[in-house]
Image (spheres, rainbow, N blue to C red):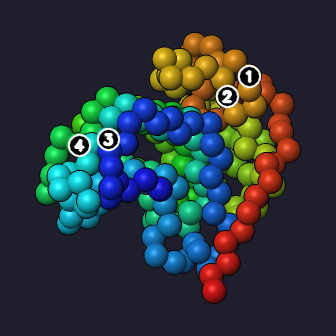
Amino acid sequence: FMEARSGDFRHIRIYNNRIHLNLASLQSSDAPRGIMVVPPPRSTGLLGRWPEFEDIVVANNLIYDLAGTHQLIQFSNQTDTHSNVFTDCHVYNNIGVNGGGYNLDAAIAAANNVRFSAAEAASRFARYVENDLTSDMTLVAGATDLIDQGTDASAFFTTDANGELRSAPWDIGPYIYGTPPIAVAPTFTLQPQ
């Protein structure tokens, strides 16, 4: 979550992440989002002007189980009362499963961001089970709409989440097809008090 209340954001890369929300109480809470990059609502914050977002890349992430309609990626104005705050920003090759949509400002270069229902995801990943953190989210041969269908983002990064070198044409999501599955990274759990 990036909300610029006290400064501008520049030269940020958010890529090859696997974002999973599996705590039911958070899934039903106040609109959890996978990745959120927004100016502050109804305020210029401490800057005295609208903050600027420049050279930010959100690419090849996998965001899943956010519960229905919650935003997968929000990279936009929250109120549409100000403009021209996004310069040279890119959102490419992201996958959303079992969540809402993408809310992207028109000034952002965006391509090949896809979303699937839980049922649709089952045929694209090695082992997807809804709300199961141990799901193997590597691509299978049948994921032809993800394999070799991505935008080349090599100007920003060149490897997948396993450290494997990407080559053109790019795959959509954090893992390139044919990469062996990896152990799920350590996680932390947030418990509402």
In the rendered image of this protein, does residue 86 appear above or below residue 29?
above
Residue 102 appears in the rendering: yes
Residues at marks 1 and 4, CA–CA distance in whole angstroms: 34 Å
Which image quadrant is residue 171 in?
top right
Hey, what amino acid is under mark 3?
Phe
**Where does label 1 land, which residue?**
164
In the rendered image of this protein, does residue 122 appear above or below residue 129?
above
Hey, what amino acid is under mark 2?
Asp
Is 110 left, or right, of 171 in this rendering?
left
In the rendered image of this protein, does residue 119 appear above or below residue 43?
above
Q: At numbered mark 2, what does the secondary structure look like: helix, strand or loop?
A: loop
Residues at marks 4 and 2, CA–CA distance in whole angstroms: 30 Å
**Where does label 4 land, which residue?**
85
**Residue at horizontal 23 percent and vertical 54 percent from the top:** 47
User: Which image quarter is the C terminus in?
Assistant: bottom right
Q: Which mark is residue 160?
A: 2
- For the residues bearing labels 4 and 3, Cβ distance under 8 angstroms: yes
Q: Which mark is residue 53?
A: 3
**Residue at horizontal 46 percent and vertical 36 percent from the top:** 12
Q: Can you tell which of label 4 and label 2 is closer to the viewer? A: 4
Which residue is at the front of the view, 105 or 102?
105
